Image: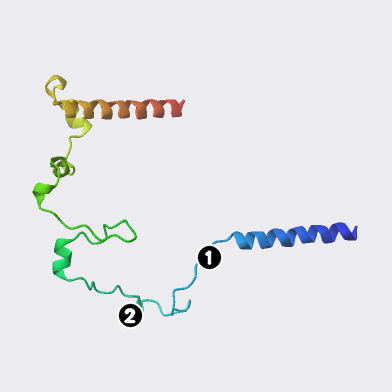
Amino acid sequence: MALTRSGSWRSVIVAKEAIAFGQRTFAAAAGKSKKGSKGAASDAPKASVLSKEVKSTTVVGANILKDGTDPKIMPDSEYPDWLWHLLDKRPALSELRRKNIETLPYEDLKRFVKLDNRARIKENNSIKAKN
């Protein structure tokens, strides 16, 4: 019996050690202690050291390559036409329902079908959930 107890205690100790190794911990920042004063001046964000000229001619932070450089800002004529319409407001489903479907442009008709299908699916799902 003594062997079974010690064997079971060993498995408990091993299990606790495995849990401790499975926890994710984070290292403290270099030069900072864990119990540092909150809101210290060293925690404040640093002012940007980039010149205004660099900020106005490059897209700072858009580089995704390790050895690459930030892309330069080109004139508007160099970009494709579709880019300028990405942020245009598109009509909502309620607005599209008020209009005559036969006179809608193709893009609005496509959007109407998509939004109407989505609304019907949500309605059917809510009905099924109630039953």
In which image quadrant can residue 117 be found?
Answer: top left
Left of 78 or right of it: where is 49?
Answer: right
* Residue 17 locus on image (x, y percent): 67, 63
Left of 9 or right of it: where is 43?
Answer: left
Left of 106 or right of it: where is 4?
Answer: right
Quarter that holds the N terminus? bottom right
Q: Residues within 10 Å of mark 1 (few under 14, many from 20)?
A: few
* Residue 104 locus on image (x, y percent): 13, 25
Residue sticking out furthest to the front: 67
* Residue 41 locus on image (x, y percent): 33, 80
Tell me which numbered mark, 1 or 2, is placed earlier along the sequence.
1
**Tag of residue 58:** none
Q: In 3D space, how far apart are the residues under numbered discs 1 and 2 (Cα atoms)?
A: 26 Å
* Residue 131 locus on image (x, y percent): 47, 25
Residue type pointed to by label 2: Ala
Residue corresponding to mark 2: 41
In which image quadrant can residue 113 be found?
Answer: top left
* Residue nearest the observer in this picture, 5 or 63: 63
Give the vertical position of 85 relative to 58 (above or below): above
Residue corresponding to mark 1: 25
Give the vertical position of 121 relative to 76 (above or below): above
Q: Residues within 10 Å of mark 2 (few under 14, many from 20)?
A: few
